[in-house]
Amino acid sequence: MRKKSKAENVYGKNVFVTGASSGIGQACAIAFAKSGCTVTGVSRNTEEKTEHFPGGGSLSLHRLDVTDEAAVRGFVESLPGVDIAILCAGMGVAGPAETTPSEMTRRQMEVNYFGTINAAQPCLTRMRGQGKGLLIVIGSIAGRVSIPMQSQYSASKYALEAFTDAVRMEMKKYGVRACIIEPGDTKTGFTAARVTQDDSSAESYGSVLRKSVAKMASDEQNGRSPDSVARVALALAGRKDPPARVPVGMDYKALMVLLRVMPDKCKEFILSKLYLPKGE
């Protein structure tokens, strides 16, 4: 049987990536640069440099905080072009919904939701003006299924699902496409960077919080490579009419199908068994 050839990028070679210094963002930036694209990557903490790849592609890294709306808008407007935007910047907060401090919740939404909007809006303006473009938002399976002790993280990713759905409908007539990739457990620096509520301020939950976070960390560090997400992003760039959302991996695709027909009580029972171990 003849091997199916990889779909060609149908949107253009100018690619903008947030969160490009590590994890999924870095994997996407490198993958598109290796495919021959001119990639501009940004991150809050990164060494500013440019790397060239065989085939004519390049990756330029720049220091930029996605929560600084004016700085992000000015940076995007200064780019020579934005054909594809891959918005990966994010962080995680863990803690009981009852006791998570408001400052942790605000930081979660500021980075994951507002940071994505700050980058998306000027990119969409550029794409609408040129009559073509692709917006890829990195969401999460947790944006479809709320995870206990990750209520704020799940909420931020749920918000991205709604935002991306609206963008897709609004921008279609301008030739701009939008989709969200939904990774599950992925082995990245996200795990070590997770902000967890202090045990003393969640003492009513005993050791449940600590054990739950340990379970999350173990699953993530035994999860897929971020390259698996980059391959999905590359495949989407080859589709003129990409799907609304793409879970990463056949197991998560099957899970999403199953959860659509599973009663809520069954779903909650399974998730509770996985992420709410008995306390001491």
Image (spheres, rainbow, N blue to C red):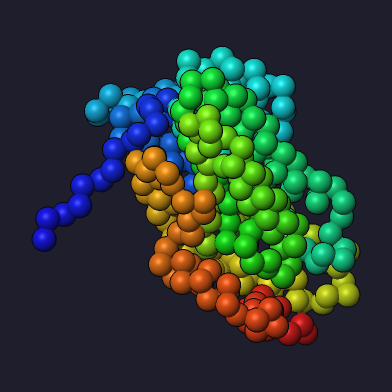
Given residues 160 and 168, the one toward you in this image is: 168
**In-image side of 137 versus 74 (left or right):** left
The residue shown at (42%, 44%) is 241
Quadrant of res 201: bottom right
Q: Position of residue 240 (x, y in %)?
A: 39, 40
Whether residue 85 is visible here, answered yes or no, is no
Q: Position of residue 39 (x, y in %)?
A: 43, 28
The residue sitting at the front extreme is 173
Whether residue 243 is visible here, answered yes or no, is yes
Q: Position of residue 90 (x, y in %)?
A: 63, 45
The residue shown at (45%, 59%) is 248
Q: Position of residue 277 (x, y in %)?
A: 69, 81
Instruction: State the quadrant of the N terminus.
Output: bottom left
**In-image side of 207 versus 89 (left or right):** right
The residue shown at (67%, 50%) is 162
From the viewer's perspective, is residue 177 above or below residue 279? above
**In-image side of 2 versus 228 (left or right):** left
